[in-house]
Image (cartoon, rainbow, N blue to C red):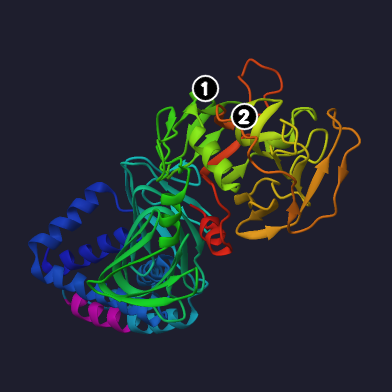
Amino acid sequence: MNQEERLLRAFHLKATHDAGSIPSDEHRELLHLVSTDVAIADALADDLLVHRLLRQAANGVGDERFVTGVTVRVKSERDGSAFLRRVERCLPARRRWPWLAVASVAAAACLLVTLLIAWPRPASGDLLVVSGTTGETSISGIRAGTGMTVSPGAPLTCGADGQLALRVGDGSVLTLIGTSYAEVERVTDGLALRLERGTLTATVALRPSTAPLRVRTPHGEALVLGTRFTLTVGELTTLTVDQGRVRLTDARDGTAIEVIAGGRAMIGARTAVLRTHALAWYDFNEGSGNTVRDHAGRGTALDLLITDPTAARWLPGGGLRLERPTRLLSSAPAKKIAEACRLSGELTIVAAIEPDAANTRGSPSDYPKRLVSLTAGLDARDVSLSQGLYHGDRNVLDVRLRTSASTVDGKPSLTSAEPVLTPPRRLVVAFSKDRHGACRFHVDGQTIPLRLTEEQPDGSDRRFSPPAATQQLAGDLSAWALDMPLVVGAEREAAASGMRAWLGTLRRIAIFDRVLSDEEHAALARWP
């Protein structure tokens, strides 16, 4: 082939490559032409520049389909142009190339103007595509693979050894690293993600102020217009900026700071402080094994043992899902909890959970479903935080708390005035009692009304007090036993009838010997 034929061949191969359908032998031929001929390499580079100008002319639309569509249509119009065919037929073979090149440029110029006006542009938005993955990664529960498109609402997870890279239409790259969990919230009018756990690194192309990248965490929000940064979520949200600047907003009070290149900032310190003051604190982020570690800052660690590991499943990115009846049992009696609460006269239990629909399908007599308990069995306890009522509403929150004025089973109980545990739902529930007997429920950081529930042992003759934000419970916590274990899930062994087994996902459980402030409830209500 002469030079003109080689150039035409290179453009033909490039068009095939851009359309995404080039065979491997033609791909090798294209690479050979580019690497051995400087003129061809320069010509293709100029063509690439036109490709970029097309993107800019499309007002920054970050969708590869627009540019790819224009490129394919240009190739189609070149191949099918009646004008070019007429030029080719009327010229002698040895003179066709110069005139054909001139005609081709003129026709292409007209065509580009026409296409930019007439080509249907996609709706404004960002296209997220997986550009690379290593280790254990998934999208909506399906193993992630290069080329997969990520839709709004899709959960993104990485195991301990995983990395998941996403390419945005504008060339930005977002990478989840290690034990991480995130969700894409929005791709129109700017890109929005929620990073609930783990690490996100990003190189973000310059974006218009009307369509920034937003990354929400349990502690606040990072707003990005173009930069390179790393965001890590654990007990705190930590931002490190390598290039550009990022605005970081603390969800507690709305305080915003600008973090510039070389800077580092943290938000969410309240949660970290709370952990050091807790009697028991479980994050369920072990990822494997049959032990859940107590990360509280007080006393000897009270680890939990999963009595039937086959009934539970660790989730990528954190969390333990109880799929069949089982229980998590403390390695020793929960003496440090009972002693501290007896001394202070106060108690707060917080649980970040996702109830399973199976909780609503049990026998009417297999309620309440036990979530967190200090218990010696079905008829004796210090406290139980549960779902549902015996032969009653199955989605209410129910607490039995033993006091000096109650039964050993903790009756009368305290029940949410409305069903709040209806699946599918992720939520943070909390129960608290102060030293004066005032009891409250919080759901997602907000106080909800509750009632005192009195009934006969068989569940008959049930009577409710009027709903109120606070209910007064007689007696104190001096009657608490010191030898009861901490139990999460089923109250009895699997072989026993009436297990009262709660099913669903556990994200965090924390127990305190004091009443928390509204600010502290709000901090713990952010999804861990």
Q: Is residue 87 left or right of residue 373?
A: left
Residue at 78 percent of width and 39 percent of height:
412
User: Which residue extends farthest right?
Assistant: 461
User: Residue 239 location in percent, x, y?
Assistant: 33, 65
Residue at 39 percent of width and 58 percent of height:
236
Q: What numbered label is drawn on residue 308?
A: 1
Instruction: Kindly state the secondary structure of the residue where label 1 is placed.
Output: loop
- Residue type, numbered disc 1: Asp
Is residue 124 rendered magenta in the image?
no
User: Which residue extends farthest top?
Assistant: 495
Which residue is the site of mark 2? 375
Residue at 24 percent of width and 82 percent of height:
102
Q: Nearer the viewer, residue 305 or 406?
A: 406
Residue 391 falls in image quadrant: top right
Question: Does any portion of residue 93 appear in the rendered image?
Answer: no
Sequence-wise first label, 1 or 2 = 1
User: Residue 417 location in percent, x, y?
Assistant: 78, 52
Residue at 74 percent of width and 43 percent of height:
395
Q: Is residue 111 left or right of residue 192?
A: left
Question: Image height check: is 80 above or below 194?
Answer: below
Tell me which segment is drawn in magenta.
Answer: 95-106
User: Residue 325 location in percent, x, y?
Assistant: 61, 26
Q: What numbered label is drawn on residue 429?
A: none
